Image (cartoon, rainbow, N blue to C red):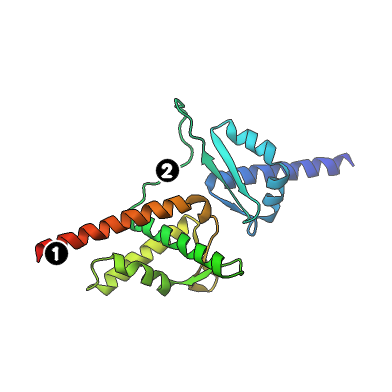
């Protein structure tokens, strides 16, 4: 009996270690890590306390089924950051906003929980915002580089055996808000207006 209890405690400890490491490496998804997710739901208070000691906040979305860590923003806190802050390029921001807008449209129009998009559809979203339309091969490489980067961040996931089909992961809702979309849309309008004025001036 004692041996069974020891084995159970050892397995639980291993799951805790695995879960903590996974969270430190990136988001955890219920659909992919069932065992760790059960531990996460059951021991979330314990985990929140653990991560708060190193300046991290545990965010859990039970409805969408994902969890991730966020660096706590505290004034006068000189603790080194464990979470890498990314500086996005214009086109990386553009693709993230487009993906988020597409998901919002899907949720308002359809009841299906999962949204899939084809690589060609993403290319069509991006095409108007790339000036070098004459070099199609170069442009497609740029589009695919962006898709690969956004996939590495966990916002797109290629389907097994279908590398041109992607699922938009709902965790993007936690990183690209409605305010972000509005701000970026305004920035985009200003940028297009400036480019239009420059073209008129050159003519």
Q: Quadrant of the C terminus?
A: bottom left
On screen, residue 194 versus residue 94, left or right, reads left
> Helix or strand or loop: what does disc 1 sit on?
helix
Mark 1 nearby-residue class (10 Å; few <14, some 14–19, many ≥20): few
Q: Is residue 92 above or below residue 121?
A: above
Residue in front for this viewpoint, 60 or 183: 183
Residue 69: % across, % down:
55, 43
Mark 1 in CB contact with mark 2 (< 8 angstroms): no
Mark 1–mark 2 Cα distance, whole angstroms, equals: 39 Å
Tell me the residue that label 1 is attached to: 200
Closer to the eye: label 1 or 2: 1
Figure check: 135 above or below 53: below
Q: Is residue 95 left or right of residue 61?
A: left
Residue at (58, 46) in percent of width and height: 23
Q: Secondary structure at mark 2?
A: loop
Q: Residue furthest left?
A: 203
Q: Which residue is mark 2?
A: 85
Marker disc for residue 99: none
Q: Residue at x 47, y 53 (%)?
A: 178
- Residue 139: give x, y in percent of width and height: 29, 69
- Within 10 Å of the Cα at label 2, are there few (<14), some (14-19), or many (20+) other Cα atoms? few
Q: Position of residue 114 (x, y in %)?
A: 58, 67
Residue located farthest toward the top when viewing the structure as drawn: 76
Could you tell me how many numbered marks the image carries?
2
- Where the N terminus falls, by quadrant? top right
Using the image, determine if residue 119 lies above or below residue 11.
Answer: below
Question: In the drawing, does residue 127 fall left or right of residue 203?
Answer: right
- The residue at the far right in this view is 1
Please tell me which of labels 1 and 2 falls first in the chain. 2
Residue drawn 67% across the image and 43% down it: 16
Q: Position of residue 67 (x, y in %)?
A: 60, 49
């Amino acid at each position: 009996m004692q041996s069974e209890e020891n084995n159970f405690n050892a397995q639980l400890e291993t799951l805790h270690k695995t879960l903590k490491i996974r969270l430190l490496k990136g988001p955890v998804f219920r659909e992919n890590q069932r065992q760790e997710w059960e531990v996460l739901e059951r021991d979330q208070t314990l985990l929140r306390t653990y991560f708060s000691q190193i300046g991290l906040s545990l965010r859990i979305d039970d409805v969408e089924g994902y969890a991730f860590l966020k660096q706590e923003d505290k004034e006068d806190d000189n603790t080194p950051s464990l979470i890498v802050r990314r500086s996005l390029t214009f086109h990386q921001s553009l693709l993230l906003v487009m993906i988020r807008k597409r998901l919002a449209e899907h949720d308002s129009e359809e009841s299906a929980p999962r949204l899939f998009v084809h690589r060609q559809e993403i290319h069509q979203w991006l095409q108007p915002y790339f000036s070098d339309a004459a070099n199609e091969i170069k442009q497609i490489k740029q589009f695919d580089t962006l898709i690969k980067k956004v996939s590495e961040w966990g916002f797109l996931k290629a389907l097994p055996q279908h590398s041109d089909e992607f699922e938009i992961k709902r965790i993007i809702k936690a990183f690209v808000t409605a305010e972000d979309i509005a701000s970026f849309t305004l920035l985009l309008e200003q940028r297009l207006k400036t480019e239009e004025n420059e073209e008129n001036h050159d003519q």
